[in-house]
Amino acid sequence: MKETINIVKHSGEIEEFDLNKLKNSLRRSAVDERLILKIAAEVESNLREGMTTKQVYKMAYKMLKGTSRVSASKYKLKKALMQLGPSGFPFENLVGKLLSYEGFFTEVGVTVQGHCVQHEVDVIAQKDKNHFMIECKYHSDQGRFCDVKVPLYIQSRFIDVKTEWKKQPDQQSKQYKGWVYTNTRFTSDAISYGTCAGLGLTSWDYPPGNGLRERIDRSGLHPITAITSLTKNEKTQLLDKGVVICNELLENPLLLEQVGIGQGRVHNILEDLEELCKPVKLLYNEKR
């Protein structure tokens, strides 16, 4: 670029546009290098001072969707997580399935007895000696961060549950931990407190290299809201049926017919899903 162009982030912060960040985010979505250069050149030529990151994303996404539906689905992962609402249950379900894929025995939406009171726990996850109590914080606006009040609250609940768990004779050897998952980001204070208190924290991009973004890419467990060949209404109907991840549609294609999708479209959608649901080895190192 010949001159510095500043853009406005979702948080309202102003930063210098970095073309390499755009290219890296496209590489993460398995976009062909020639197409990456074409999209980058097009975005660069249309960039204007004060544009928002949302406008930049829309430019890139529109070009990508017209060329590769599967890459477009991967590229819109962050937005797809925001579209799992309005309730937080689909996000809780996704977290449970992700942990199940990683070898945990999971339960979603569980009532557990604490030392003092009962608690509604979003996800319980167990593997070997690890026993996690997980709270999921879903936001439909990526400008909303999880501040320090969230881990403070979750840690107090976890301590109450842990006290009761440890009374059980078969639980003495377990390693207990509270955890917070969010589809957005944590504030620096939230991370500082969580780290100090021994509370697990997982967000879109935290911990670095092992946030939701990377774990979904590695597992292939993309939310159905990422599928570009489904309409908004079709996605809503599937979510209402409890369908959250793309793999569920591959395992039961009749679900697509049940929301009124014809055989011709079903075939095309399943072709996209076969590619989208493949676990991948991450070969990139970038921030977006």
Image (cartoon, rainbow, N blue to C red):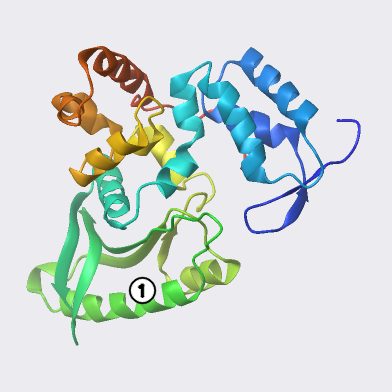
**As drawn, is 257 to the left or to the right of 244?**
left
Residue 129 seen:
no
Residue 131 x/y as whole percent: 24, 61
Which amino acid type corresponds to the residue marked 1 in the rendered image? Ile
**As drawn, is 58 to the left or to the right of 109?**
right
Residue at the outermost right position: 2
Residue 260 x/y as whole percent: 20, 27
In front: 206, or 228?
228
What count of labels does the image hold?
Answer: 1
In front: 47, or 190?
47
Residue 173 x/y as whole percent: 19, 66
Q: Circle 1 sits on which residue?
A: 154
Residue 198 seen:
yes
Question: Crowding at label 1, few (<14), some or many (≥20) Cα neighbours within 10 Å?
Answer: some
Q: Residue at x 52, y 44 (%)?
A: 209
In which quadrant is the N terminus drawn?
A: top right
Q: Is residue 168 above or below residue 258?
A: below
Q: Residue at x 15, y 69 (%)?
A: 111
Q: Residue at x 21, y 56 (%)?
A: 126
Residue 10 x/y as whole percent: 62, 53
Residue at the outermost left position: 169
In which quadrant is the C terminus drawn?
A: top right
Q: Residue at x 36, y 64 (%)?
A: 179
Q: Is residue 235 above or below residue 15?
A: above
SS at mark 1? Answer: helix
Q: Is residue 68 above or below residue 195?
A: above
Q: Is residue 35 above or below residue 178?
A: above
Residue at the outermost bottom position: 116
In front: 247, or 283?
247
